């Protein structure tokens, strides 16, 4: 099919998804369901068009994810980081690891996959999704006590790098298992390189961008977001070349630019919020196009029990383990955070990595992950407001005086 026809078709799908966004927000549905639904409805042969390109889908998903995390960094105030970094940082690092281990053993008992493949599956769904969390908290107009919303947002914005590292390492291990089992030292070295290189490049690029924009007078304010976009692209490319984690790099660079830029900060945030929406809509629609409805039915019932056990066993256990050093934390907040671990498009993007690498059973994994995400959004998304009210965490808006 000619490229111009493909571009036209995807543009029409994005426009349809955007027009359906407001009704979905009114109903409290995350935008990912609308855009993926559009992709599912229009791209699997019903209209003479079939899309099936795992490599391209994985590339688009990775670029979109980098963009979303960068924009999340731009919009994260330092005061939120100072408040949430201890609890949120524990949840976004150790929480991902605990969830992977616990859910990996659960999957091993339920499915025919071997333990390493089950751990890979668990790593794919171990992180929460920033876009889903932000969307539902905003649509429900929730103001949560004890900084619960800030901690959930910080966790969801920062837990993707650890999950991605685990997915890549486990995929490499399965693909290269013939070359021998990696040692603890090699794993620690790889993790250290990914995190260290990503953090250093993010810090350098963020500082350089802020210094340049604050000290060099540009003739047009419109050039400032273009410069930041170029800095974002340099951060991603240089991090990949040097073997670092791109998500860590772009998040740190985004936080520095968003908090220390003196000129053109507002116009840049508006510009990148639009870019983030474009990235999200394109990613969700491409993911919807990549998933074939006729292949979902066979794994639907097989996905139900793992999804429920992830919500009621693996996530709560992992969160409670993370909160052991924070015994003074309010028990209602701990319970709420345990119950609300919203999944989104991120796990589906992560599931494409082993699929593109040719891991056995990865196609089936993508479809099971799709249902796990769907069940999480429906059940946990619907439970946020009633649970917050039940635990007396929701700050009710004050009624105006008569």
Image: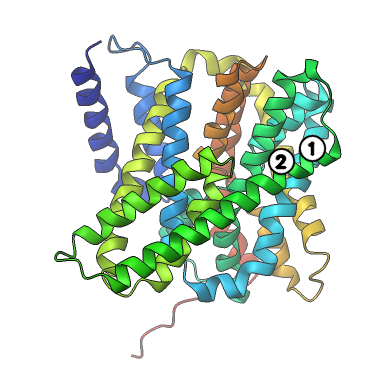
Residue 349 at x, y percent in the picture: 52, 33
The residue that mark 1 highlights is 186
Q: Could you tell me if residue 282 is visible in this image?
A: yes
Residue visible at 42% across and 23% down in the picture: 56
Q: Position of residue 17 (x, y in %)?
A: 29, 37
Could you say which is closer to the camera, residue 137 or residue 10?
Answer: 10
Q: Are marks 2 and 1 in contact (CB under 8 Å)?
A: yes
Who is closer to the viewer here, 227 or 121? 227
- Name the spot of residue 92 as percent of width and height, x first: 66, 55
Residue highlighted by disc 2: 190
Q: How many marks do you count on the picture? A: 2
Q: Residue 112, can we see it?
A: no
Q: Is residue 35 above or below residue 178?
A: below
* Residue 257 image position (x, y, % from top left): 40, 65
73 and 292: which one is in front?
Answer: 73
Question: Which residue is pictured at 49% across the width and 13% down the height?
Answer: 294
The quadrant of the picture occupied by the N terminus is: top left
For disc 2, the neighbor class at 10 Å (few under 14, some 14 to 19, many from 20) is some
In this view of the protein, which residue sits in the foreground, 72 or 110?
72
Q: Please rate how many residues cluster around mark 1, counting C-alpha atoms within 10 Å: few if below 14, some from 14 to 19, many from 20.
A: few
In this picture, is 331 found above or below 168?
below
């Amino acid at each position: 099919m000619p490229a111009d026809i493909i571009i036209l078709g995807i543009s029409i799908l994005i426009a349809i998804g955007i027009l359906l966004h407001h009704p979905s927000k009114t109903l409290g549905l995350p935008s990912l369901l609308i855009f993926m639904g559009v992709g599912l409805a229009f791209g699997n042969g019903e209209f003479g068009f079939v899309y099936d390109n795992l490599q391209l889908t994985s590339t688009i998903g990775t670029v979109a994810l980098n963009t979303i995390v960068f924009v999340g960094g731009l919009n994260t105030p330092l005061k939120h980081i100072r408040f949430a970094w201890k609890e949120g940082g524990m949840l976004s690092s150790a929480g991902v690891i605990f969830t992977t281990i616990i859910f990996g053993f659960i999957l091993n008992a339920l499915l025919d996959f071997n333990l390493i493949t089950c751990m890979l599956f668990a790593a794919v769904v171990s992180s929460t999704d920033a876009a889903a969390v932000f969307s539902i908290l905003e649509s429900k107009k929730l103001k949560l006590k004890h900084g619960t919303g800030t901690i959930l947002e910080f966790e969801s914005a920062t837990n993707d790098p650890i999950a991605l590292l685990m997915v890549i390492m486990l995929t490499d291990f399965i693909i290269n298992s013939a070359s021998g089992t990696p040692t603890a030292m090699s794993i620690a070295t790889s993790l250290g390189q990914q995190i260290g290189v990503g953090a250093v490049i993010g810090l350098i690029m963020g500082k350089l961008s802020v210094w340049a924009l604050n000290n060099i007078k540009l003739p047009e304010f419109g050039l400032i977001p273009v410069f930041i976009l170029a800095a974002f692209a340099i951060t991603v490319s240089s991090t990949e070349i040097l073997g670092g984690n791109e998500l860590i790099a772009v998040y740190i660079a985004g936080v520095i630019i968003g908090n220390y830029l003196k000129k053109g900060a507002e116009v840049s945030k508006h510009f990148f919020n639009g870019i983030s929406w474009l990235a999200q809509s394109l990613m969700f629609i491409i993911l919807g196009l990549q998933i074939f409805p006729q292949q979902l039915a066979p794994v639907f019932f097989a996905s139900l029990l793992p999804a429920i056990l992830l919500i009621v066993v693996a996530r709560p256990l992992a969160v409670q383990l993370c909160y052991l050093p924070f015994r003074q934390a309010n028990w209602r907040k701990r319970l709420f955070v345990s119950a609300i671990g919203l999944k989104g498009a991120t796990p589906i993007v992560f599931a494409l990595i082993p699929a593109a690498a040719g891991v056995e059973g990865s196609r089936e994994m993508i479809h099971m992950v799709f249902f796990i995400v769907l069940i999480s959004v429906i059940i946990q998304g619907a439970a946020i407001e009633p649970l917050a009210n039940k635990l007396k965490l929701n700050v009710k808006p004050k009624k105006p005086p008569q």
